[in-house]
Amino acid sequence: MSDLVGKLICENLKALKPYESARRIFAGGDSESETWLNANESPFANDFNIETAHFNRYPDCQPQSVLVPYAKYAGVQANQLLVSRGADEGIELLIRTFCTPGKDSILICPPTYGMYAISAETCNVGIERVPLNTDFSLDLPAINAHQNKVNLVFICSPNNPTGTSIGKAQLQQVLEHFADTALVVVDEAYIEFDASNTWATELAAYPNLVILRTLSKAFALAGLRCGFTLANSDVIQSIMKVIAPYPMPEPVAQIAAQALSPKGLQQMSEQVDYLQGQKLWVKQKLSQLPGLELIGSDNANFILFRHPQKPALMDFLVKNSVLIRDQSKQVSLDNCLRITLGTQQQNEKLLALMVRFFTQQRELA
Ligand SMILES: Cc1ncc(COP(=O)(O)O)c(C=O)c1O
C-alpha cells in the first residue's frame, strides 16, 4: 500500500480481509475442466432471450416486469418488495439504511453466511456474535440479552453452511422480543429447498420482519446478480433512499422476468426436485464412508460433513479438479467441508473420488 493510500483508506478497512468467495479462492478456474461444487450454485445453465432495443436508455430503478411476478411468486404486495444486485446488496443496503457508522451494531449467529459481518465491517458498523446452540438452534436468552444494543438481527434459515432451519416458535420469539428495537432479517436464500418454512406470509403480523431472497440458488442465476428484500413498505421506502439510481441492468431485468414467468417457475421447481433427489442419494452414499459425520441438516442445496482427515481430503479433491468448500474456520465447524449438490454425473465423480481417497488412506495405514 502506498503512503497516500495508507493515509487515506478508512480506518475500519485497514485490517479488513475481503470476503473469501468460492470464486475468489479458486480465481481463474474453469467450470468446463473443473467440477464446481463449492458455491451453492445450481448446476443448471438455462436459456434466455435478450431484446436490445432499449439499451440506449437507463433502466427502471425497480422494474415492474420483475417486481410484479416476484411479488406474486412470494405472496407479497409489490410495495413490500425491493429488487437489488443479489441478496448481498440487500444485506448491505439494510446495514447502510438502518445502522449509523461508528455507533450502531448488528447481531449475527455463527456459524453462518459470511457477508453479514463483512458488510457491517465495511460500513464501520459493530458486530455482536451469538453462536448457535450445539444443535444449531438459536440461543434465545443470549440473543434477547442484546435488546437495545443492535439495530438488525440477521438469521439465516435455511442456514448456510449448516443446512438447518430455525423453528417457527424460536423466530417468533425473536421477532416479538425485538418488536420495538430492531429489524429481524430472515435470510431465505435457500427457501425453495424448504418452502414450507418461509416467513414471507408473516409480513403483516410483524412490522419488524425483513426477508432476503435471491435468484442465485434454486433459480440457477448466480451470474445474473438479482436478489430481493421483502418487508413492510416503510422499510422498503427507507432503503429506496440509499439504493443506487439504476441498480438493475436492463438485461438482468429481462432475464429475471423470464425466470419468473410460469414456464420459468415450472423449470425451477423441476430442477429443485431433481436436486432434492440427488441430495438424498449423496447423503446416503456419504454416510457409508469411514469416519465421516454428517453435520447439521439438509434443508438447502448442500451437505455439510466432518472428517478428521479434512485437509488431506480437500487437497486430494482439488488436485483432481473437484472443488468443494472448506468451512473449518467457522465456529463449531472444525474439520468440516460443504458439498453443493451438482448433477448426478458431478456427484458421482465426487463420490468416486472420495471412495478412492479413503481406499488409498486404508492402504497407507
Ligand atoms: C445465506 C446466503 N445469503 C445470501 C447469499 C448471496 O446471494 P446473492 O447471490 O443473491 O447475492 C448467499 C450466497 O451464497 C447465501 O448463502
Image (cartoon, grey):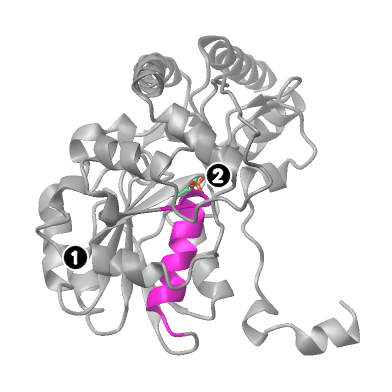
In the rendered structure, find residue 225 and report the number of the disc placed on it: 2
Residue 93 in the magenta stretch? The answer is yes
Disc 2 residue lies near ligand 1 with CB under 8 A? yes
Q: Callout 1, which amino acid? A: Leu
Q: Name the secondary structure under disc 1.
A: helix
How many marks on residues? Answer: 2
> Residue 157, image x and y in percent?
30, 47
Q: Callout 2, which amino acid? A: Arg
> Residue 290, image x and y in percent?
48, 22
Residue stretch in magenta: 83-100
Q: Residue at x 71, y 34 (%)?
A: 315
Residue at which label 1 appears = 140
In the rendered structure, find residue 276 and report the number of the disc placed on it: none
Residue positioned most to the right: 2
Instruction: Estimate how packed mark 2 is, as few (under 14), some (14 to 19) or many (20 or more) residues with alpha carbons within 10 Å.
Output: some
Alpha carbon distance from label 1 to label 2: 33 Å
Image quadrant occupied by the N terminus: bottom right
Image quadrant occupied by the C terminus: top right
Task: Place residue 329 in its image quadrant.
Answer: bottom right
